[in-house]
Amino acid sequence: MKKLLFLAFLPVASLSYGQISILSTDMPVPTGSYNIQDMTSSGLPASPVPGTNITWDYGIYGGNDYTEDYLPETDTFFTNVGVDVNYYTYKSMVGGANGFFYNVYSELDFSSTGVVEKGRAVDYLAFDLSIVTGNSGDSLVVPAQKARAPQTVQTMKFPLTMSSSWHSVSRQVTDFTLTLSPLFDHTPSQHVYYVHRDDTVAGWGRMRVYTSTGPSAWYDVLMDKISYYTVDSFYSAGAPMSPIILSSFGITQGQQTDSQDRYEFYRKGSYNYLAQLNYYEDNSFTNLSDAYFNTDNLDPSGVNEVNNALYSTVLYPNPVTGSEMNFRIMGGNVQIAKYMIVDMAGRIVMSADGDKGTVLHVNTAELASGTYMLQVLNDKNEHIAKEQFNVVK
């Protein structure tokens, strides 16, 4: 769903990181549930910028929790061709808010060279068409079925590194029966569609996301730019379905559906994305619709190093809704000598000396609602932390 959102995103000052390459050994086969959140509690972030040595900071964006599942495949029809897990999704037959679709399990095979979809299993589903045709008994029935794909959809290619790219096209067929009085009576029919997918690793850098105790640690990530769509055709009794019948349901032969333009950010240790940002049918990647991040296996705060002293930091609460914001350094012999609060225009709106301790209690009563950056320095005038936060009044 599209939501009313505001812009509140600022990249952290540039730091130098090395890009990573991800191998099959860095992405274990997923098992069971994984947990995600949408990035909406503080407004949707701005579109991420592709490029090299980028810092993407989503540490303040949290929202509703969701759970999705990867299920180990046990059906020998699929395991005999290497399938490891299946993943629930859907396929549209009629697009739009009043459209209908059927449930699909994508059958995924993990190997040293990549991850491919080797087949699909479809759940039984029936649609009552009488509300459209006015004829009692008209229906479209999708029986339970399974099929191996003669051409596979590649979802990951190893090694995954900057400028990696691949293209895949796969032909899929779903059988159904159609009853449209008086023309069709449980007539065997087919939904034939070609899945087109293009991936390009368009950036690398570091990212952090939201946790309930503050921003997570920074993770080295690769940015995968994905464009996905299907081209659909419909057949009945072995012949192309009549355009007149199709148009009555808002369908055309060769229609394009299920467009999904998105960025996904990957780290080592998980096949599931760290963050996903969706543009859906906007292939210019301009208008961000929604965004999600994976909440599993997150360290609660960033780990930093100054003069060989390792430490972590946390800023809370965020957003600030009262009159006080707190900042704490944990671990390492690092002390706060000075801090500044900078607004989105780069103006210093507050500054003060610290007490050379490890905790700050900042009075934010005079700060207007908005997004700010806390910059913390030690007694050698070194920046030891930069934390973005929101004030909401």
Image (cartoon, rainbow, N blue to C red):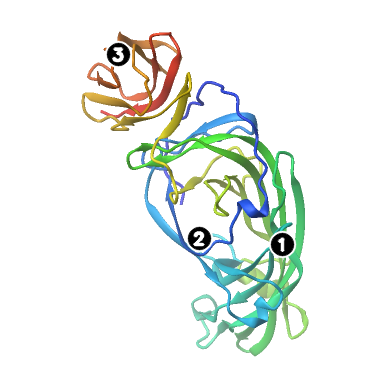
Between residues 19 and 294, which one lies in front from this camera angle? 19
Instruction: Identify which amino acid the numbered label 2 is placed on.
Output: Ala
Measuring from the top left, give residue 14's x and y in whole percent: 56, 22
> How busy is the neighbourhood of tag 2: few (under 14 within 10 Å), some, or many (20 plus)?
few
- SS class, disc 2: loop
- Quadrant of the rendering where the C terminus is positioned: top left
Q: Earlier in the sequence, mark 3 or mark 1?
A: 1
Camera-nearest label, 2 or 3: 3
Residue behind mark 1: 153
| Quarter where residue 392 is shown | top left
Residue behind mark 3: 356
- SS class, disc 1: strand
> How busy is the neighbourhood of tag 3: few (under 14 within 10 Å), some, or many (20 plus)?
some
- Cβ–Cβ under 8 Å for marks 2 and 3: no
- Cβ–Cβ under 8 Å for marks 2 and 1: no
Is 187 drawn above or below residue 234 in the view shown?
below
Measuring from the top left, give residue 2's x and y in whole percent: 46, 47
Q: Residue at x 62, y 41 (%)?
A: 223
Q: Earlier in the sequence, mark 2 or mark 3?
A: 2
Is 97 drawn above or below residue 236 in the view shown?
above
Measuring from the top left, give residue 267's x and y in whole percent: 57, 45
Residue behind mark 2: 97
Q: Residue at x 36, y 29 (%)?
A: 331
Q: CA distance from mark 2 to mark 1?
A: 27 Å
